[in-house]
Amino acid sequence: MNFPKLTPEQAIAGICHGDTISFSGFSPAGAAKAVPLALAARARKEHAWGKSFRVRVLTGASSGQCIDEELALAEAISWRAPYQSGKILRSQINRQEVEYVDQHLSHVPQMVAEGFFGGIRMAVVEATEITSDGRIYLTTSIGASPTYLRYADQVVVEINLSQSQRLREFADIYMMPLPPHRTPIPIYEPLNRIGVPYATVDPRKVIGIVETNEPDSVQDFSGSDKISQNIAKNVVAFLLNEMRAGRIPKSMLPLQAGVGNVANSVMAALGSCPDIPAFYMYSEVCQNAMVDLMIREKILGISATSLTVTGTKLREIVDNMDFFSSRIVLRPQEISNHPGVIRRLGVIAINTALEMDIYGNVNSSHIGGTQIVNGIGGSGEFTRNSYLSIFMSPSVAKGGKISAIVPMCPHIDNNEHSVQVVVTEQGLADLRGLGPMERAKTIIDNCAHPRFRDYLHQYIRKAPVGHIPHDLTLCFEMHRNFLQYGDMLPQG
């Protein structure tokens, strides 16, 4: 079957106000580019004519500027799931102008398949090739694209001429049947391949292809600072101690790491520590720092769902595909984040938090409990099911006026039942086997900034007795102080 070539404008001609559109992409990696820009331009025209035109948007996770920024700037989004990272879109969500569903990422494919989000009018995916029988070779991410291709009414394929055909060598696409017909996922080591290098689509649903020639818009993170380096030292010291105690095997367990400067500092520290053996990663994203450690053979291989690297680093990978093709596996997010696989492999999860309370509950997503930053992403799936769950944060923010350790988090993404280790630049709190009061004292003494320790100790001394002592009249006093005075400590 020959698929017609379309302009981006032709591709979106049949989209109506209120339709659900799913786009490829997990982070900017592999995100659709030309079609969302055309959709944003059409929204502006419709609005100029006084017509309503907004669509519901699904992606794998966060996405590229063409989706989370340009569509939001055009006020073209009415509903968004399962994650986002755009500054403009974030503001619209926090003003209740866009409805946002913050979702565990591995849940998305099944929810789509079961119709929990309603029907998908169109899926737009980036690829290097589509064959006449409907095999689609995706680019730098897999994400939820295989599911969107299966369940969308119509499909548009963006053929990106800037992406290497050899990227397909990373792909391992395995689709799970719906309950109750599921069988165990046969992944027993991080790099086990269990699928095929392509997604599939019914060719009759493909209305055409759009050619593009745009690279992924992945930005590198800024350099590591002293606080991030100290957090990293604390994490590495803890892992070394666990190895010496025999609680981590000498061959190491696979790691998962979130994104950002702190996570990159941890990877750098692990890579430079001679007592940490070479290790595998079973994670969501493969980033620049991880690629560098693979080159040094400190990381033996990475299983992820996206290749979230800068253009320069991607060229380095493509130019050395004979080295990398056996060391990187890209899977659908339903597999990369699957609780059963995470538990089976004994993954050590290392993620970042906005704030943590004295009992070990973690807020990863909402400032003050109300203002979304990005979302939970995959941190909950890895935290709940990991062999060791570690959360990291600088102890203070805003020049020391905000404490990352508070009496009670006003929003909780990961609770004390799942969080085992809390780390700041001040130190590390190992919470395993500790009851609430022991957890509180350990976190305050080891992780809170000295400026806030007396207040936090005083809080638990004065709180009414209970299994988890809390004073419901004062548990959010630090947050209220900051809103009123610009400082979490009481004034006067």
Image: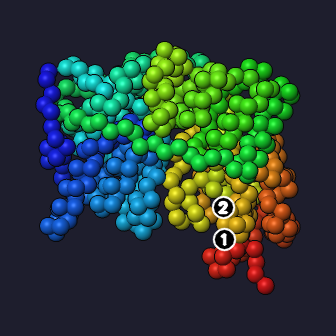
- Amino acid at the residue labelled 1: His
* Nearer to me, 482 or 29: 29
Colour theme: rainbow
What residue sits 84% from the left and 52% below the top? 446
Residue 232 seen anywhere in this rendered image of the structure: yes
Q: Quadrant of the C terminus?
A: bottom right
What residue sits 30% from the left and 32% below the top? 160
- Amino acid at the residue labelled 2: Cys
72 w.r.t. 23: above or below: below
Residue 128 image offset from top left, x and y in percent: 31, 27
* Nearer to me, 41 or 413: 41
Mark 1 and mark 2 residues within 8 Å of each other at the beta carbon: no
Residue 82 image offset from top left, x and y in percent: 43, 47
227 w.r.t. 367: above or below: above
Q: Quadrant of the N terminus?
A: top left
62 w.r.t. 97: above or below: above
Reading the image, the residue beneath label 2 is 409
What residue sits 65% from the left and 31% below the top? 255
Quarter of the image where one finds residue 468: bottom right
Which secondary structure, mark 2? loop
Reading the image, the residue beneath label 1 is 479
Residue 240 image offset from top left, x and y in percent: 81, 31
Horizontal side of 326 relative to 233 (left or right) equals left
Residue 119 seen anywhere in this rendered image of the structure: no
Mark whose residue sits in front, 1 or 2: 1
The answer for how far apart the CA atoms under marks 1 and 2 are is 9 Å
